[in-house]
Amino acid sequence: MTELTDALPGEAQEADDAVPGYRAERSLFDGDTGSFPLPLRQALVRLLRGPYIDGVADPRLWGLILDNRGAIATYLCEIFLVLTVDPERKIAMLTPAEVDAPHTAPIQPRKPLRREETLLALRLRLLLDRHAGTGTEAVISRTGAREILEEPRHPGTVDDKRPEELTDSSLARLAALELVLPTELPDEYRVSSALALALPFDTIDEIPAYLAALDRTADAGGSADTLLPFEDPESTLATDDGGD
């Protein structure tokens, strides 16, 4: 544990009462009654902003979250959020608790993925699992994404321009959620390990069945929106409503 590790709230209150000047040392602004040090508060803000923390990209922040996991999780429970940590993939993210009571919905609205975005995300989820343990990164090109989105098309039912628009909008949405990340090559993206937590399945064998259900829903003219477990980052809240 690092020196930043705090006691849990009840224990922290006892420490506050026992050590003179404890709160004064931690005070960051007028009226500050918090007990967490500045770096830990900043980590909380990063988690709340989302969509996730990548431990490979930010090892210092990752270590801070691991060392203070208990205190962070306890704090977040107060606002109906659950801290999810995947030590193997080094991903930390928040998911809303399922509570059947008024005023317990996520603080930020969660926009569902549209059918095309869901289709692409599911195929990339399969790609991510195929690369697990190989030491290679799962990548997708814009051309590859377009081919995925063209698979369920019926010839002659969609004009040539539509797949291009759907490819760009779907990649843009997944990129905004940081589920695909840009690489040094143009029109090529790395699939983020966070996709495994955003679209969790007990086994990858469940994904083809989900894809088939997605096609059946589309053929029947229904909606196939998928709700991700984390909130949209602020930059995506002003995008379209998700309808065609």
Image: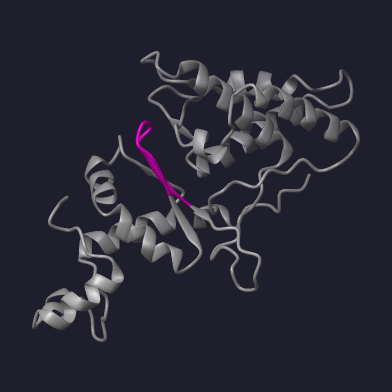
Question: What is the total number of numbered labels drawn onto the structure image?
Answer: 0
State the residue in front, 172 or 14.
14
In the image, residue 81 lies in the stretch drawn in magenta: no
Q: Give the image quarter of residue 201.
A: top right
Q: How is the image coloured?
A: one colour
User: What residue is drawn where x is 16% and y is 83%?
Assistant: 17
User: What residue is drawn where x is 36% and y is 55%?
Assistant: 46
Q: Is residue 140 visible?
A: no
In the image, residue 90 lies in the stretch drawn in magenta: yes
In the rendered image, the residue lying farthest to the left is 20
- Residue 160's place in the image compared with 166, above or below, is above
Q: Is residue 198 visible?
A: yes
Q: Quadrant of the C terminus?
A: top right
Of helix, strand and loop, which mostly describes the magenta segment? Answer: strand
State the residue in front, 221 or 140.
221
x and y, in percent, of residue 2 in the image? 15, 52
User: What residue is drawn where x is 55% and y is 58%?
Assistant: 97
x and y, in percent, of residue 232 in the image? 54, 52
State the residue in front, 21 or 168.
21
Q: Which residues are magenta?
A: 84-94
- Residue 51's place in the image compared with 129, above or below, is below
x and y, in percent, of residue 22 in the image? 12, 78
Q: Give the image quarter of residue 226.
A: top right
User: What residue is drawn where x is 44% and y is 69%?
Assistant: 78
- Is 127 left, or right, of 154 in this rendering? left
- Residue 80's place in the image compared with 162, above or below, is below
- Is 244 left, or right, of 13 in this rendering? right
State the residue in front, 161 or 127.
127
x and y, in percent, of residue 166 in the image? 69, 33
In the rendered image, the residue lying farthest to the bottom is 31
- Residue 28's place in the image compared with 241, above or below, is below
